[in-house]
C-alpha cells in the first residue's frame, strides 16, 4: 500500500481542475493499493485554484497571495493519512509545490525548474517515508 498524488490516478484535482494520469501509476494501481491524496485540497484550497510556487519558505500564488498555511496544513494531513495506514512509500507528482520530489518550479512562474522538494514531499521524507515521483517508476 502506498500514498499517491490523486492527479496521477486521473482525479481532476490539479490547480486548473485537470488531472495528470500517468500510465505507470495506473498500471501499478492494478496490482497494488494506492491511496489517493491531494495535499492542496486537504489544506483547504479549492479546485480550480490559482497556480502556486514556492518562494523561499513561502508558497505564493501567481497573484501574490500567501498560501503557505494551506500547503503546510495539507502536508500535515497527508502525513496523518500515511501514519494511519502505516505507509512507507508515496508516489507524488513531480514539480508540484506540494508533491515535487527533487524538482520544483523556481517561484518566478517562468517554467524554470530547480532542485528542491515540495512542502508535502519534504515533510514525508522528514518522517521516514520514501518519496518517489512518477518519473522514478
Image (cartoon, rainbow, N blue to C red):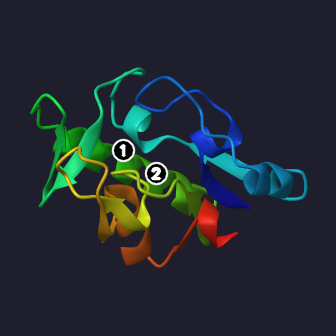
- Placement of 53 over or under 49, stated as above or below: below
> In the image shown, does 83 or 4 lie closer to the viewer?
4
Per the image, the residue denoted by label 2 is: 78
Residue at image location 42% in from the left, 36% down from the top: 42
Residue 30, x across and y down, in percent: 89, 51
Q: Kindly check if marks 1 and 2 are in contact, taking CB atoms under 8 A apart as contact.
A: yes
Residue 29's disc number = none
Per the image, the residue denoted by label 1 is: 74
Residue at image location 33% in from the left, 29% down from the top: 44
> In the image shown, does 127 or 107 lie closer to the viewer?
107
Instruction: Name the residue at the bottom extreme.
Output: 128
Q: Quadrant of residue 41?
A: top left
Instruction: Name the residue at the right extreme.
Output: 31
Residue 45, x across and y down, in percent: 33, 28
Q: Image quadrant for the C terminus?
A: bottom right
- Placement of 84 over or under 8, stated as above or below: below
Residue 90: in sight, yes or no? yes
Q: Image quadrant for the N terminus?
A: bottom right
Residue 131, x across and y down, in percent: 53, 70
- Placement of 102 over or under 104, stated as above or below: below
Residue at image location 40% in from the left, 30% down from the top: 15
Q: Residues within 10 Å of mark 1 (few under 14, many from 20)?
A: many
Residue 134, x across and y down, in percent: 62, 61
Residue 33: in sight, yes or no? no
Q: Quadrant of residue 36?
A: top right
Query: Element under label 2?
Result: helix
Amino acid at each position: 500500500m502506498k500514498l499517491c498524488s490523486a492527479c496521477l490516478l486521473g482525479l481532476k484535482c490539479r490547480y486548473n481542475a485537470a488531472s495528470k494520469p500517468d500510465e505507470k501509476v495506473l498500471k501499478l494501481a492494478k496490482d497494488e493499493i494506492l491511496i489517493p491524496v491531494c495535499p492542496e485540497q486537504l489544506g483547504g484550497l479549492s479546485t480550480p485554484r490559482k497556480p502556486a510556487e514556492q518562494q523561499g519558505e513561502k508558497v505564493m500564488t501567481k497573484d501574490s497571495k500567501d498560501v503557505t498555511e494551506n500547503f503546510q496544513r495539507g502536508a500535515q494531513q497527508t502525513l496523518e493519512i500515511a501514519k494511519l495506514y502505516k505507509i512507507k512509500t508515496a508516489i507524488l507528482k513531480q514539480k508540484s509545490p506540494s508533491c515535487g520530489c527533487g524538482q520544483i518550479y523556481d517561484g518566478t512562474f517562468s517554467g524554470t525548474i530547480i532542485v528542491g522538494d515540495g512542502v508535502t514531499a519534504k515533510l514525508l521524507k522528514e518522517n521516514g517515508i520514501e518519496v518517489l515521483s512518477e518519473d522514478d517508476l
